[in-house]
Image (cartoon, coloured by chain):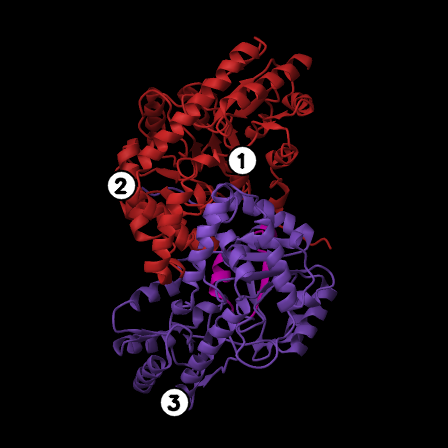
Chain colours: A red, B purple
Amino acid sequence: MSVPMARRIDSMRPSEIREILKLTQKPGVISFAGGLPSPELFPAKELAAVTAVILEKDGASALQYAPTEGHGPLREAVAARMNAKRGTRVTAEEILITSGSQQGLDLAGKIFLDPGDVVLCESPTYIGAINAFRAYEPRFVEVPTDDDGMVPESLEWILETERPKFVYAIPDFQNPSGRCWSLERRKAFMEIVTRWSIPVLEDCPYAELRFEGDDLPSLKSMDEKGLVAFLGSFSKVFCPGLRVGWTAADPEILRKLVIAKQGADLHTSSLCQRQVEAYLRLYDMDANVHRICDTYRVRRDAMVGAMDREFPKDLSFTRPRGGFFLWVEMREGMDARAVLEKALEKEVAFIPGAPFFPCGGHENSLRLNYATMDGPRIEEGIARLAGGLREV
Amino acid sequence: MSVPMARRIDSMRPSEIREILKLTQKPGVISFAGGLPSPELFPAKELAAVTAVILEKDGASALQYAPTEGHGPLREAVAARMNAKRGTRVTAEEILITSGSQQGLDLAGKIFLDPGDVVLCESPTYIGAINAFRAYEPRFVEVPTDDDGMVPESLEWILETERPKFVYAIPDFQNPSGRCWSLERRKAFMEIVTRWSIPVLEDCPYAELRFEGDDLPSLKSMDEKGLVAFLGSFSKVFCPGLRVGWTAADPEILRKLVIAKQGADLHTSSLCQRQVEAYLRLYDMDANVHRICDTYRVRRDAMVGAMDREFPKDLSFTRPRGGFFLWVEMREGMDARAVLEKALEKEVAFIPGAPFFPCGGHENSLRLNYATMDGPRIEEGIARLAGGLREV
C-alpha cells in the first residue's frame, strides 16, 4: 500500500543511466555506456594472497566491529600516498575511510546542506554526485566550464549573487567530460574560493590515470584555509568491488563527517580495509597504475582515431589525456536520446549527456567510455555508432 | 576555519557511548560496555577457504561494480533463510542488501522523514537508530514499554494525537534492554498499525540468538498490508566486520530504498556479499548459531547468577532469554554516570542507560553486555561493580 514519504523523494529519481545500462546488457551490444574499469586488470591473485594472511593472523579483528574513522594503518598509508601523489600535507587523523568515495558525497551533502542551499558545480558534472546531493534538496547552479576547467570570471560573477554551501569539482579527467583543469585555472579557482571562504569538495578518482603530460597539483594542495575536502578512491586504480575510498578534510569538518558516517553504516568493512592496506604495503601500486594507464592509453587512441576517421565533421569531442571518458557534442538541435535509439538498433550503446547537467538542457551531448574493452572492439563500436549518426 | 553547516548538525551529537568506550580500553578494565560479539566465534577459517575460491573463479565480478540491490544469489539465500527462520514469505526481489543493517536505518530515515516528522519508538530504544534518524530531524515519541514489549493501549492512545511517519521496533532481545515481545503483544501491535496504516521498521539482529523457549513470529510475518520493513543482520550470528545486512520491504518502499542507497554508496562490497553467500551455501549456519547460543547462554547465566548473589536488592534487572544485553534499573534518584565513575576506579565499565531514551531522563538505568567475555571474568566484573554500587 502507499504510505507518505519524505518530500525529498520527489527529487530523488532512479538514475536514467541505470535504465539505459539494462538495455545495453543484451549479448552482441558493444557498450560504451558503463563507467566500469576493465576487470582483467584487477589484482585478484594478490588479493587472495593477502586475504589468506589477514584471516589467519588477524581474523578476530578483521571480522569485528571497528572505529568509524577507519583502520589506523590504512589511514596512515592513504595519507602518505596522497601526500606523495597529490602534493598535500595531510595527516592520518585528517583521513576518514569511506564505503567508496560515493559515500563521501552523501556524507558531505548531509553535513552541509539544508533544503534550498546552493551547490555550485561544473557544467556538466558527475551524475552520482547530483543524485547524492539531491537527497538533501539543494539548488544547483552550474558554473560555465570549458576545456581548461571552471571559468574563473563566471565563478566570481555567480558569487556576487549566490552564497553556495560548497563548490563541487572534479578537476582531473572529469566524469563525464574527460576534461582536466589547467594549472592557471586551479590557482585562480583557489584564489577565489579562499577569498570568499567557500568550502570545496574536490572529487579525485581519476588523477593517477594520466596517459601523458605532467601531474598537476590538487586543489587540496593549494588550500591555505582548510576549505577543501578531498574525496579519494581506489575504484579506478585498484578495484571498485571492495568499496573502499576516503575523504581528507580539516579536523572540524572531518569530525562532522565521522558523526554522519557513524549513523550511516558504523564503519567500512574491516576486512576490505585490511585488504587494501596489505596490498599497499606488500605490492607495488604504482606499477599497477602504470599497467592500467598503458592499457587505457591504447584504448583512448583507438577510440579517438576511429572517431577522427568515421564521425561526421559537424560534431566535436574531447581528447582526454587520462581517465575513462570522452565527451561528444553534436550539432545544436540533435537529440542524443534519438541517436541512442538508432545506435541500439546497430548494437552499440552510450550514455546521453543531458542527465549530467542538473539544470537541464544539452540534449545534443553524449558520453563514451573507452576503458572497458580492447581496441578492435572499440573500433567496431565506433564504426557502428558512426553509421547510426549518419542515419539520424 | 569555521564554515556554515547544515541545521541538522546541531542534533547530530557524537555518541556518548563512543566516548565511554575510549575510557574502557585501558588494560585491566573489565568492560561490559561495548556491543561486540565474541570474536573467537567468528568463522575465520571458513571465510579464508571461500575467499580463495571466489577470487580464483569469480575474481573479475567479485572486484567489479555491482547492482545496488545486491548480489542476486545472496538476495535469494537471504529471502530463503528469512522465510525459514522468521515465518515470512518474501521474495529475493523484496531484499535490498545493505552495508550492515545500520545502513537500513539511515536509508529508512532518508526516504520517510522530513524535519519535524514523528517517529515512534520503544522506551528505551537502540541508540544507533536514534542517531541515524536524527540526521533527518524528526521528533521522537517514546511508547511506554514493559517486559512484554510496547504497551498496545499506550500506542493506541498516542496515535489519537500523533501521526507518525513510522514506528521503530526491536521485538527480539532488544538492544539495550534484552526484552522480547510476547506473541500477544506482537498481534496487538500489528492489529493497531494495520488499522492505522502506519509503516513499521522491524529491526531484528538478535532473534536467532535465543537461549531458551520457542521462536516467536516476526512482525513482518503478520504484515498484511506491506507496512513492515524488516532489517536483518549477519553481524551477530556470523561476524560484523564484513558489513553485510539487508532490508526486506514491499516493492514500492524497496524501490525508494534502492534509489537512496545508490546515492549513499552505490552498492555493498561485492566481495563481502559473495563471502556471505558462499558461507551460507557451503557451511552450516544453523550449527554456527547453535554454537554461539551455547556460549552466550553460559555467559548470561554467569552474569545473572553473579548479580543475584552480589547486587543490592533495591535494584532490578532483566533476565534476557537471548541476545547480548541485560538492563539494570537502580533506585530513582541514582545516577548511572556517577556509578560509572566509581566503577572505572574499580576497573569495570558499562554504558549508562540515559542515551537510549531520545526524550531524556532515566539516569538511574544502565546496560551490561554479557556476550564478549567468559564466565569467570564476568563474575569478577560483577563483583567489582557490586563493590562500586555499595559505595555510591
Q: Split into 4 quadrants, where in the image is the C terminus of chain A?
A: top right
Up the image or down, B13 lies above or below B372; here it is: above
Quadrant of res B154: bottom right
Q: Which is more toward the observer, A84 or B287?
A: B287
Q: Residues within 10 Å of mark 2 (few under 14, many from 20)?
A: some
Residue that mark 3 sits on? B312
* 3 and 2 marks on the same chain: no
Label 3 is found on which chain of the structure?
B
Q: Are marks 2 and 1 in contact (CB under 8 Å)?
A: no
Q: Is residue B118 magenta?
A: yes
Q: Are marks 3 and 2 in contact (CB under 8 Å)?
A: no
Q: Nearer the viewer, mark 2 or mark 1?
A: 2
Residue that mark 2 sits on? A80
Q: Residue at x 32, y 59 (%)?
A: A57
Give amino acid for label 3.
Answer: Pro
Distance in Å between CA atoms under marks 2 and 1: 36 Å
Q: Residue at x 70, y 64 (%)?
A: B223
Q: Residues within 10 Å of mark 3 (few under 14, many from 20)?
A: some
Label 1 is found on which chain of the structure?
A
Residue A209 in view: no
Q: Tell me the element at label 2.
A: helix
Residue that mark 1 sits on? A139
Distance in Å between CA atoms under marks 1 and 3: 59 Å
